[in-house]
Image (tube, helix red, strand yellow):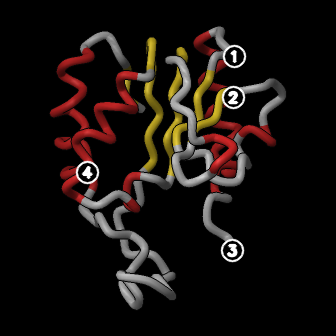
């Protein structure tokens, strides 16, 4: 399976952001197959409730990175998931969310045949959704 492998494509951006923040205290929220961690020159915290090895909720980090995850979360769960992401950050949250359907559909189970991006909304919707939570964390920066 190719899910959980997109973290690597953000590694240069995340590394540059971490260096500008003068921190190596990073949490990859929804780390999947650890491709972000494997492409950074230092160790980071990893969390993914779907991966046994990373299912324990970690302590907060200076920078929380969450890429290509939120579009897979059902709309009714987005508020608490976004709140959890922000609550795990001491300073900065880096989010990347796809705003279009995936090329893949579920092949088995309850959602068989449905698109794996279960929450597809436009950019402005996601900004409003995260601002709704972000207002409680005014000292955080959103990228």
Mark 1 vs 3: CB contact within 8 A? no
**Residue 29 pos. (x, y %):** 52, 38
Mark 1–mark 3 Cα distance, whole angstroms, equals 30 Å
Residue indicated by mark 4: 77
Mark 4 vs 2: CB contact within 8 A? no
User: For this view, does 50 lie left or right of residue 138?
Assistant: right
Q: Residues within 10 Å of mark 3 (few under 14, many from 20)?
A: few
Q: Is residue 53 above or below residue 111?
A: above
Q: Residue at x 38, y 52 (%)?
A: 70
Residue indicated by mark 3: 1
Q: Is residue 138 above or below residue 6?
A: above
Q: Quadrant of the N terminus?
A: bottom right
Q: Secondary structure at mark 4?
A: helix
Q: Residue at x 45, y 12 (%)?
A: 90
Nearest to viewer (mark 4 / mark 2) = 4
User: How many numbered marks have been drawn onto this rendered protein structure?
Assistant: 4
Nearest to viewer (mark 2 / mark 1) = 1
Mark 4–mark 2 Cα distance, whole angstroms, equals 29 Å
């Amino acid at each position: 399976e190719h899910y959980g492998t997109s973290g690597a494509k953000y590694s240069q951006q995340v590394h540059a952001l971490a260096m500008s923040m003068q921190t190596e205290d990073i949490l990859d929220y929804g780390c999947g197959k650890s491709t972000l961690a494997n492409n950074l020159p230092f160790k980071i915290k990893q969390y993914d409730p779907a991966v046994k090895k990373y299912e324990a909720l970690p302590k907060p980090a200076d920078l929380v990175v969450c890429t290509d995850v939120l579009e897979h979360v059902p709309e009714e769960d987005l508020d608490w998931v976004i709140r959890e992401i922000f609550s795990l950050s001491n300073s900065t949250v880096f989010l990347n969310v796809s705003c279009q359907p995936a090329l893949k559909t579920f092949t088995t189970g309850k959602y068989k045949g449905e698109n794996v991006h279960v929450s597809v909304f436009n950019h402005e919707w996601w900004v409003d959704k995260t601002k709704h939570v972000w207002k409680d964390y005014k000292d955080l920066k959103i990228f």
